[in-house]
């Protein structure tokens, strides 16, 4: 979605400075780094035979819940308003998304809307194509920047007053955004509780916390980060969107359908990212299930006529 850049006309600033820049960097380093250490610990324990099926069940449940919180809640509902739902379900999806530890919902939405506004052009918070270095070195630097580097390099963040005014005026979302650390803790308490419930032991709770907490955060982080990096670099581009967004089929099941990213840039408000029936899109299926249970309405679908109107790459 490349809209003309009109920032000079806007009375509201595009970006605002990050408060407490140094402590913010320390927190981000811990949030990205601790799960890597946890995976090393989990891998070492699994090698020693202490990985149990209960740990994998806890991992699958928490990965699915928080993954849907991100793609269905943060992305398709709050960023792109691709369907409508009740106040309770909006709050639940915002909480599940917060448990993914990708930042407060209002901040996430502001950044992502700015990404759509400037997609792969100056102003895009995380494009892999804005590096100066030539050849493979520039490509690698671009990918690293789009994957994680942008979170550490920036001094500014997309201004929510500019990009997420609708969410700021929602009392529930404001409260959930403000209490983000609480939901992160809930996201760790849930796998601990599930581990205890499934094994009847405290040790089961701790290994549940390791796999369904830290390792789950790691997996979902890098799947989400890959949408920003890999899905603007590798894969097919059926629609000519004016940016470098791509469909990366193998990543779609793990990313709940997010990896049909060229489709998504072509039709950002579509509730489905997998536009063809064979394109695996669990996030889209989940919204369709909500609709069938009368829990979602005004679900945005892209008609064949609209698809045909969209320019295609040869
Ligand atoms: Zn994109
Ligand atoms: Zn989007």
Image (cartoon, rainbow, N blue to C red):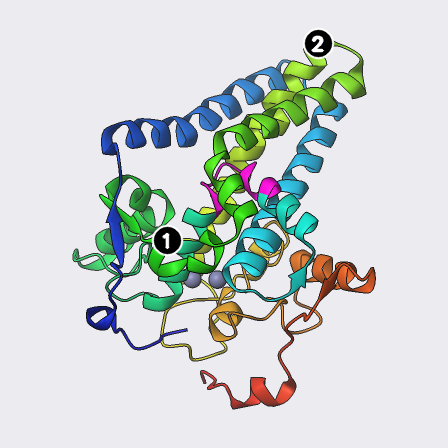
* Residue 268 picture location, percent across and down: 51, 70
Which residue, given by chain and number where applicable, does mark 2 sit on? 202
The vertical placement of 234 against 103, above or below, is: below
* Residue 224 picture location, percent across and down: 49, 48
The magenta region covers: 95-105
Q: Left or right: where does residue 285 sit relative to residue 108?
A: right
Residue shown at 52%/64% (left/top)? 80
Picture quadrant of residue 50: top right
Residues at marks 1 and 2 touching, judged by CB atoms closer than 8 Å: no
Q: Left or right: where does residue 58 sit relative to residue 20?
A: right
Which residue, given by chain and number where applicable, does mark 1 sit on? 160
* Residue 262 picture location, percent across and down: 48, 69
The vertical placement of 101 against 241, above or below, is: above
Marks counted in the figure total 2
Residue shown at 49%/29% (left/top)? 181
Secondary structure beneath disc 2? helix
Per the model, the C-alpha gap separating discs 1 and 2 is 42 Å
The quadrant in which the N terminus is found is bottom left
Residue shown at 56%/32% (left/top)? 183
Picture quadrant of residue 288: bottom right
The vertical placement of 100 against 108, above or below, is: above
Residue 102 belongs to the span the image colors magenta: yes
């Amino acid at each position: 979605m490349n809209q003309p850049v009109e920032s000079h006309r806007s009375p509201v600033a595009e970006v605002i400075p990050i408060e407490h820049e140094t402590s913010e960097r320390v927190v981000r380093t811990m949030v990205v780094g601790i799960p890597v250490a946890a995976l090393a610990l989990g891998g070492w324990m699994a090698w020693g035979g202490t990985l149990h099926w209960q740990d994998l069940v806890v991992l699958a449940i928490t990965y699915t819940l928080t993954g849907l919180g991100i793609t269905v809640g943060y992305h398709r509902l709050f960023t792109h308003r691709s369907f409508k739902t009740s106040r309770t379900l909006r709050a639940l999806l915002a909480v599940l998304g917060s448990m993914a530890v990708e930042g407060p919902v209002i901040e996430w939405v502001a950044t992502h809307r700015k990404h759509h506004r400037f997609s792969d052009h100056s102003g895009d918070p995380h494009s892999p194509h804005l590096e100066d270095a030539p050849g493979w070195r520039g490509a690698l630097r671009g990918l690293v920047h789009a994957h994680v580097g942008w979170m550490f390099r920036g001094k500014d963040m997309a201004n929510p007053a500019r990009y997420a005014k609708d969410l700021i005026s929602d009392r529930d979302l404001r409260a959930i955004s403000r209490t983000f650390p609480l939901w992160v803790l809930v996201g760790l308490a849930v796998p601990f509780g599930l581990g205890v419930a499934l094994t009847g032991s405290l040790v089961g709770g701790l290994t549940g916390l390791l796999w369904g907490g830290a390792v789950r955060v790691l997996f979902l982080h890098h799947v989400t980060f890959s949408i920003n990096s890999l899905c603007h670099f590798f894969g097919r581009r059926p629609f000519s969107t004016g940016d470098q967004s791509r469909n990366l089929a193998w990543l779609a099941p793990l990313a709940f359908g997010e990896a049909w990213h060229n489709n998504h840039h072509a039709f950002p408000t579509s509730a489905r990212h997998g536009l063809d029936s064979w394109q695996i899109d669990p996030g889209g299926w989940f919204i369709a299930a909500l609709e069938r249970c009368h829990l979602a309405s005004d679900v945005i679908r892209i008609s064949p006529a609209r698809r045909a109107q969209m320019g295609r790459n040869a």
